[in-house]
Each structure stands twice: as structure tokens, then as C-alpha cells.
Amino acid sequence: MIQLHYGNLYILRQATACRQAGVFNCMARSLKKGPYVDEKLMKKVTNRKPQAGSIKTWARASSIAPEFVGYTFGVHNGKSFEEVFVTEDMVGHRLGEFSQTTKFIRHGGKMQKEIEQQKKEAEIATAQAAKATTATAKK
């Protein structure tokens, strides 16, 4: 049997509870280490002007530093580079949070198709009614 100190057990339990709740980045990075900022990315930002175009990067895990404000980054989402313009509100977040890797289309099924068909018919009916009222108003 594995022997765990009570403090370690508490942290492990807290992390498990966070995962079950759907919060995956519950535990923050150590204050001693500081935020993770990719060194190559920081070097590119210091050597470039904000208007010089986008900076392509694969470093989705890099935190957004205050020096990044005003720059446009091309963040790779697995297929292409998504343009992300950094504002003051984004400081402290990760670059990957603003470049979605999956595309939500819709939940399908027979019921969903019926609902969409009813909405489409309702839109057509309202358009025809509006057209009829403008035609009578012109006469």
C-alpha cells in the first residue's frame, strides 16, 4: 500500500474533485517558478513592432505577458493558424485558450431536423406576411 502524507492526500483529493467537476486547470503554477512564457516567443516580441504582422507560434501553453499587448499572434490549432489580437484583458491567460481546436457544428438527430424545419417555415410565413402588408399599403 502507498503511504501518503496527509497534505499530499488532500492535494490529490482536491485535484480529483476538480477533474470530476470539469475544471482541469484547478492547480496553479508555483509562484516560485512564475508564469510560463515561451522564450522564443518573448524574443520575437522584443525584436518586433506591433504593426509588423502576426507572429506564428505553436506555443499554445505560453502565458500571455503584459509585453504581448497590442501584438497579433498566429496560434496553431492543429490544422491552421488562428489570428489572436492580444488585449489587456487577456494578460495571464494562455494563448491556446483563444484558438479553438475543435469546431462545434450542432447536435443532430431527427428531432433537431424537425425543429429547424419548423423555424424555417415560420420565417417564410412571416416574410410572406410582411410582403403582403407592404403590397396592400402601396395600393
Image (tube, rainbow, N blue to C red):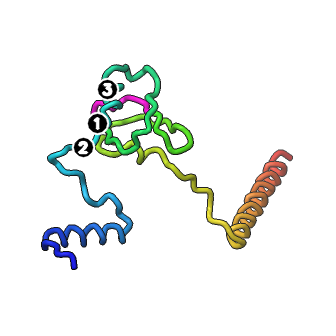
Mark 1 crowdedness (10 Å alpha carbons): few <14, some 14-19, many ≥20: some
Q: CA distance from mark 1 to mark 2?
A: 9 Å
Left/right of residue 96 with respect to residue 32 in the rendered view: right
Viewer-closest of 13 and 54: 13
- Which numbered disc, 3 or 1, marks the residue closer to the eye? 3
Amino acid type assigned to the residue bearing label 1 in the image: Ala
Left/right of residue 125 with respect to residue 53 in the rendered view: right
For label 3, the SS is helix
Magenta segment: does it hold 1?
Answer: no
Q: CA distance from mark 3 to mark 1?
A: 12 Å
Residue identifier under label 2: 35
Q: Quadrant of residue 85?
A: top left
Image x and y of residue 28, in percent: 24, 54
Q: In the rendered image, which quarter contains the N terminus? A: bottom left
Image x and y of residue 123, in percent: 73, 58
Identify which residue is drawn at 44% across, 20% down: 52
Q: Is residue 76 above or below residue 23?
A: above
Discs 1, 2 touching: Cβ within 8 Å: yes
Q: Residue furthest front?
A: 1
For label 2, the SS is loop
Left/right of residue 13 with respect to residue 118 in the rendered view: left
Amino acid type assigned to the residue bearing label 2 in the image: Pro
Residue identifier under label 3: 43
Magenta segment: does it hold 68?
Answer: yes
For label 1, the SS is loop
Image x and y of residue 111, in percent: 69, 73
Discs 3, 1 touching: Cβ within 8 Å: no
Q: Is residue 31 above or below residue 4?
A: above
**Sequence order check, earlier mark of 1 and 2:** 2
Residue extent of the magenta highlight = 65-73
Residue identifier under label 1: 65
